[in-house]
Image: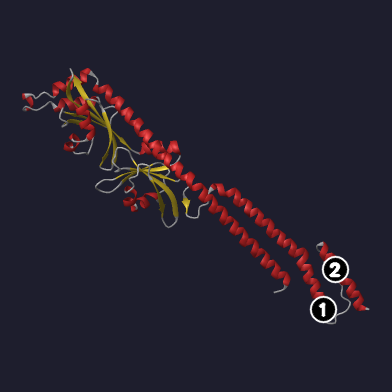
Amino acid sequence: MKPAARFLVVGLASVAVLTAAAAFCVVEQTTRSAQPHVIESLKMAAAAEAELQAGRSRELQLRADLTAHDPAFVDYIAQSLIPNPKFGGGVDTASINDLLGERHEGFDVAMVLDPAGKVVATSGTLLRDDTGIQHEPVVMDAISTRKPAQGAWVDHGKLVLVSANPLIKDGTLQGVLLAATQLGGGFTNAIRRIVRTDVVLIVPSASGPAMTTSEGVESWVEPVLTAQIPQVLSVTSATGDELKLSDSSHSTTAWVSPLGGTNGHAVLVALDPNHDDQNAIQDDAMPLLWLVALLGAIAAATVLLQWRRTYIPLQRMLDIIDRAAAGDEFLTVRSEGSPIVLYMRDTVNRLLQRYKK
C-alpha cells in the first residue's frame, strides 16, 4: 500500500474509532446520570397513588356518612333488624335489600351488617366471604369504637376501598353500613395523568395475579411482569424497590410499591416513561451525540483534505522522482496542493532541470 493510501485508511479508521468511543461515553454517562432522576420520578407514582386512594376513601366516606346519619334510614334498618314472626323469627332482609338498592348510588357495593357484624343484606357484588367480613379489622373497629373506619381489601383480584359506618339510634348500635368501591382502570389512568408514568396495579387472586394497566402500557410489559410475579410480590419495603423488566427486545426500569392497607398483597408498578428497545438512547444524550458526530465529520473532512492536498501530490512527486532515478528525462512535476506541496514542487522541478543538463 502506498503511503498516501495508508494515510487515508489509518486516518479515517482513527476518526471512526475515536468518534464511536466518544459516542459510547456520552451514552453511558447520560444513562447513569439519568437513572437517579428516573427512580425519583417513579417513586412519585406511589405518592400519587396514596393521595388518590386517600381522596377516594374520603369521597366514599362522605357518601356513606350521608346515608349512615340519615335518621330515616337508621330507623328503617333498626325496625327491619327486629326479629319478626312473619319471617320465621328472622329479619326483613328483602326490605333492607330494597332500601339499599335505592341508596346504592355512589357505591359499587353496599351492605348492612347486624350489631355483631354479620351480613344481613347486600346490594352489589362483593366476592368476599360473608363470615370473613364479620372479622375484618375495619368492621370490628367500627363496632367497638362506634366510629367510621376505612380500609382497603384485596378481593379476588380486585382492590376495593371500604368504609364501615355504625348505625346509631338513641345511643345504641343498630347495625353497620358497609360501603365499598372498586379501584380499576380509571384509578390507574388518574395516576398516569398526574405523574406522566405508565403504571400497573397488581392484585393477586386464587386464579393468578390480576393486572390493571393504565393507558399506554405496551403489550410486552404484562407477560414480563407475569413471569416475575414472585419477585414483584416479594417487595415488602414501604418505600418500594427497583425492578428491571426486559425481554428479548425491550428493557425498562420499574419501581414496585406495596399499597397501603393491603398488607403487601397488592402492589403498584411504575414504569419508566422513556422505556423502549434495549438499544434506546436517552433523549438528553442526543444533542451531545450530534456534537460528537459533527466533530467526527470535521475530523474526517480534515483527513480527506490533507490526503487530497498534501499526500496525493506528494505521492505523485515520489512517482516522478522514482522515474527520474530510473533514467527518464524531461520530467516536470505539475502537482497542485497545499503551500508545502507547492514549495516542494518548485524545488523538485529545479532539481529535475539540473538533472537534464
Q: Which mark is residue 323?
A: 1
Element under label 1? helix
Q: Nearest the camera: 91 or 268?
A: 268
Residue 78 occupies which quadrant of the picture? top left
Image spot of residue 297 (x, y percent): 67, 56
Q: Which mark is residue 345?
A: 2
Image spot of residue 98 (x, y percent): 19, 26
Residue 123 visible in the snapshot = no
Q: Residue at the spot x=90%, y=72% of the render?
A: 350
Q: Residue at the spot x=55%, y=53% of the render?
A: 27
Question: Which quadrant of the rendered structure holds the N terminus?
Answer: bottom right
Q: Residue at the spot x=40%, y=42% of the render?
A: 199
User: Viewed as shown, does residue 152 lie left or right of 312?
Assistant: left
Residue 205 occupies which quadrant of the picture? top left
Residue 152 visible in the snapshot = yes
Q: Nearest the camera: 101 or 296?
A: 296
User: Viewed as shown, does residue 149 lie left or right of 201?
Assistant: left
Going by the numbered disc 1, the residue's amino acid type is: Arg
Q: Residue at the spot x=45%, y=42% of the render?
A: 40
